[in-house]
Amino acid sequence: MQRVSARGELVARLRDGQTRVERLFQEGAAKIRLPARDGEALEAILINTAGGLTGGDRIGWHIEARAGASLAVTTQACEKVYRSSGGHAETTCSIAVGAGARVAWLPQETIVFDRSAFLRRLDVDVAPNAAVLLVEAAVFGRHAMGESVAAATFRDRWRVRVGGRLVHAEDFAIGPDVSASLSKRAAFGGGQAFATLLLIAPDAAERMDAVRAIVGESGGASFWKVGETGKLLARLVATDGYALRERLTPLVTMLNGRAGLPKTWSL
């Protein structure tokens, strides 16, 4: 059967006081679109023209903001991971943030279907005086569509470095008995959706009270000092994708500064 094998790359640089595209590459089902901007940040929209992923599909992205550039990256829609007839779907993303630059990685939710198999990897390198906002969210079946996920495999690996030093590493794994894991009180407590948000920035500590107020009791937030910068980590758990969005939207809006919420999130 035909499988997706796709790759996209976007490199942005600061020129004449504006963030501009230096390199754009797209191959296969990976497409990148750049809508008209309202602010100083360049906004990029990633598109998987295959319409979703299934076993054997591979898609990779490379995002880079060079010194002083400001870049926000999102997706056209939620990525759907469908039932696999063999093998796993895989997405990889590498992000490089240069001195004084800022990147916001804000893809919409990944929707996981029953009997799917998915591996995701995120590798980020940040200059010591730069900033990056990372958000990844997943929904196990759409409640409004009557969907549920009994069995699936989902693996998510993050590695984030500041000045070459590893400051955040996590490996999330659920499955194959997803329904049992979701029902556990120490895990999701019956919820079907979750999000992880990581902010690396010099002013991250100043956002803690506002973040905790939005996250509420169904999740948590913590802060660590990392060299000359800060690391703020927040996790949200919700009953479904709609409830997750109710808190994730104001959280992203607040943490993304003047760039606010990507246009595609409100469509």
Image: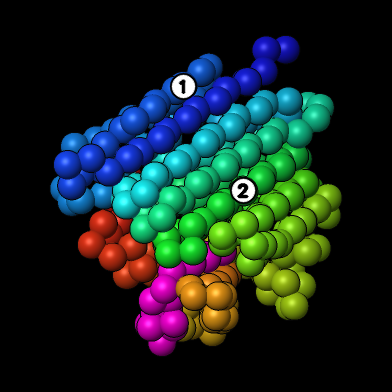
Q: Specify the amino acid type for callout 2.
A: Leu
Neighbourhood count class around disc 2 (C-alpha, 10 Å): few under 14, some 14–19, many 20 upward: some
Residue underneath mark 1: 26
Q: Is residue 198 magenta?
A: yes
How far across and how far down the image is residue 43, in percent?
30, 43
- Quarter of the rendering occupied by the C terminus: top left
- Residue at image position (49%, 75%) is 228
How far across and how far down the image is residue 106, in percent?
43, 52
Q: Specify the amino acid type for callout 1.
A: Gln
How far across and how far down the image is residue 5, in percent?
63, 20
Residue located farthest toward the top when viewing the structure as drawn:
1
- Residue at image position (49%, 63%) is 128
Residue underneath mark 2: 122
Q: In the rendered image of this protein, does residue 209 appear above or below residue 229?
A: below
- Asked which secondary structure carries label 2, the reply is strand
Q: Can the viewer see residue 108 in this picture?
A: no
Q: Earlier in the sequence, mark 2 or mark 1?
A: 1
- Residue at image position (18%, 47%) is 17
Please state the extent of the stretch shown in magenta in the rendering. 196-211
Q: Is residue 86 magenta?
A: no
- Quarter of the rendering occupied by the N terminus: top right
Q: How many numbered discs?
A: 2
Looking at this view, is 168 or 263 the one in front? Answer: 168
Instruction: Give the CA separation, mark 2 to mark 1.
Output: 19 Å
